[in-house]
Structure formats: C-alpha cells, structure tokens
Amino acid sequence: MENIRFTALEAILKRKPLVFKLPSAKISDYFGEQTFSDVSMQEFLPDDAYKQVLRAINKGEKIDRSMADQIAASLKAWAMSKGATHYTHWFHPLTGATAEKHDAFINPVEGGGAIENFQ
C-alpha cells in the first residue's frame, strides 16, 4: 500500500504547473463578466420580464409562473452563450452544511448524439 502512495506522489511531482493568464491587468476590466447582471438581464430578458425581476428584487414582489419560465429560459440562453453545458443548484439547508444538485443542459442519446433539455 505504501508503494502506491509514493508512486502517486511521484506522478504528481512530475507534473508541470498550469500557467493561468489573466484576461487583463486590471481586474475591473473583467470582474463580474460571468454574472447574470443587470446589463445581461436587459440583453436577454423580454422587457416585461426584466421589469418584473426588478420589482421582485427591489420591492419583494412575487414573480408569476409564466414569467418565471421566461426568466429561466433567458438565464439558460445567457449561460449557454457563455459556453455552459451543465448547471448546479447550490443551496444551504438548515443543517449548517452545504448541498448541491447537478444537472446538464445536454443528455446523451443512443448512437452517440445528444439532446438539449431544461426541465
């Protein structure tokens, strides 16, 4: 068993470090670009859905079901425009720990193809 651990450590130590190149020297140039922000909502949401989201954020109003489906579809379109193929619903249960639910936008089908779904 000890040999397996040393072999694993040797393999790790032989790896070359990955070089990460920042998109810009100024963090403010790219900060929040992967966020469904107000600018993103204006671009991807229909006007009535955008206004309802703002009312929900600012006034605590509820979003009706048909509008929620439009918002979800717009959020999916935004995420896929950023290259997303999977998503997670990350939540904090009242146990003091975290929990996650992972799903994909794309499901494999027989024959090597794939279908898109979001439900």
Image: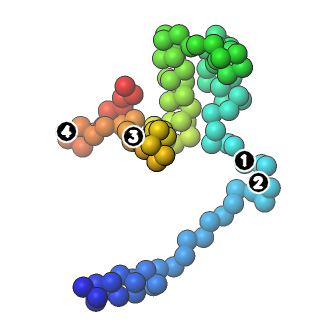
Q: Quadrant of residue 81?
A: top right
The residue labelled by disc 2 is: 27
Camera-side mark, 4 or 2? 2
Q: Quick check: marks 4 and 2 in contact, CB under 8 Å? A: no
Residue at the location (39% across, 40% down)? 101
Q: Using the image, determine if residue 24 lies above or below residue 111.
A: below
Q: Using the image, determine if residue 114 lies above or below residue 67.
A: below
* Residue kind at label 3, given as amino acid type: Lys
| Figure quadrant of the C terminus | top left
Secondary structure beneath label 1: loop
Camera-side mark, 2 or 3? 3
Sooner in the amino-acid sequence: mark 3 or mark 1: 1
* Color encoding of the figure: rainbow
* Residue kind at label 1, given as amino acid type: Phe
- Number of labels in the image equals 4
Residue 22 lies left or right of residue 8; in this view the side is: right
* Residue kind at label 4, given as amino acid type: Glu
Between the residue at mark 3 and the residue at mark 1, the CA separation in whole angstroms equals 26 Å
The residue labelled by disc 1 is: 31
Q: Which residue is nearer to you in this view: 99 or 84?
A: 99
Between the residue at mark 1 and the residue at mark 4, the CA separation in whole angstroms equals 41 Å
Residue 77 coordinates in the image, percent (x, y) = 52, 29
Q: Which residue is nearer to you in this view: 34 or 56?
A: 56
Residue 26 coordinates in the image, percent (x, y) = 80, 55
Name the mark on residue 101: 3
